[in-house]
């Protein structure tokens, strides 16, 4: 069985579990996109969090990957829904990039599509989080660690090209 197959749920699995067993199966805590933006920007602006966010950007984690992972972590915690995260993610990413610009940190906005696989990206994210010294592991460390863990939860699918088959494949 492939690694991707082990990480995904079995079809119909949610129908055999207790309803509202997980935070994302319940109504979100915040539904207004403006409040969600305020929540994330206030959270990132915290002195303990922004230093870790800037450290990850400086390490080579693209701003888009970091902001999307933070959105995924918030959705899985039941803070807001997926559709709201799609609306607010660009705003949160822009805020992080402006903070990095103000701090004089060079960063990537996104990964190039051919740069590395999803597994390699998740591994880089883990390395970046692990590079934070023990004595600096505070509330901000927990935020970026949660984001890194949310990236692991996303299904890892390697692209494979199927060889053409049949009469017209020649």
Image (cartoon, grey):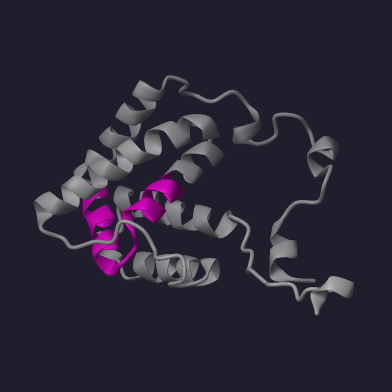
From the top left corner, tell me how far across and down residue 95 is, in percent: 24, 41
Q: Which span of residues is magenta-colored?
A: 49-70
| Residue at screen point 33% across, 30% down | 37
In the displayed structure, 159 sits above or below 109; it is: below
In the image: residue 165, left or right of residue 115: right
Q: How many marks?
A: 0
Asked whether, in this view, residue 125 is left or right of residue 7, the answer is left
Report the front residue among 138 and 39. 39
Which residue is at the front of the view, 48 or 76?
76
Task: Name which quarter of the figure residue 157 lies in.
Answer: bottom right
> Is any part of residue 133 visible from this angle?
no
Q: Main secondary structure of the magenta part?
A: helix
Q: Nearer the viewer, residue 79 or 103?
A: 103
In the displayed structure image, the side of residue 18 where residue 134 appears, left or right = left
The residue at the far right in this view is 167
In the image, residue 13 sits, relative to residue 132, either above or below, namely above
Query: What residue is shown at x 82% (from left), y 47% (from top)?
Result: 11
x, y (%) of residue 49?
27, 48
Identity of the residue drawn at 26% across and 43% down: 94
Q: Quadrant of the C terminus?
A: bottom right
- Residue 136 lies in magenta, yes or no? no
- Image quarter for residue 103? bottom left
Where's the N terminus, which quadrant?
bottom right
Is residue 40 something one can see in this rendering? yes
| Residue found at the far bottom of this picture | 170
Quarter residue 155 falls in:
bottom right
């Amino acid at each position: 069985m492939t690694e991707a197959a082990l990480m995904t749920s079995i079809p119909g699995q949610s129908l055999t579990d207790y309803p509202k067993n997980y935070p994302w199966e319940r109504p979100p805590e915040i539904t207004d996109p403006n409040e969600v933006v305020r929540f994330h920007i206030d959270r990132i602006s915290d002195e303990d969090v922004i230093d870790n966010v800037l450290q990850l950007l400086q390490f080579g984690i693209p701003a888009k990957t970091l902001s999307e992972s933070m959105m995924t972590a918030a959705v899985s915690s039941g803070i807001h829904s997926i559709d709201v995260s799609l609306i607010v993610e660009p705003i949160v990413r822009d805020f992080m990039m402006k903070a990095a610009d103000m701090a004089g940190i060079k960063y990537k906005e996104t990964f190039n599509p051919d740069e590395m696989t999803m597994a390699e990206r998740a591994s880089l994210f883990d390395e970046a989080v692990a590079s934070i010294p023990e004595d600096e592991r505070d509330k901000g460390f927990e935020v970026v660690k949660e984001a890194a863990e949310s990236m692991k939860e996303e299904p890892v699918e390697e692209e494979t090209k199927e060889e053409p088959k049949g009469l017209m494949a020649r």
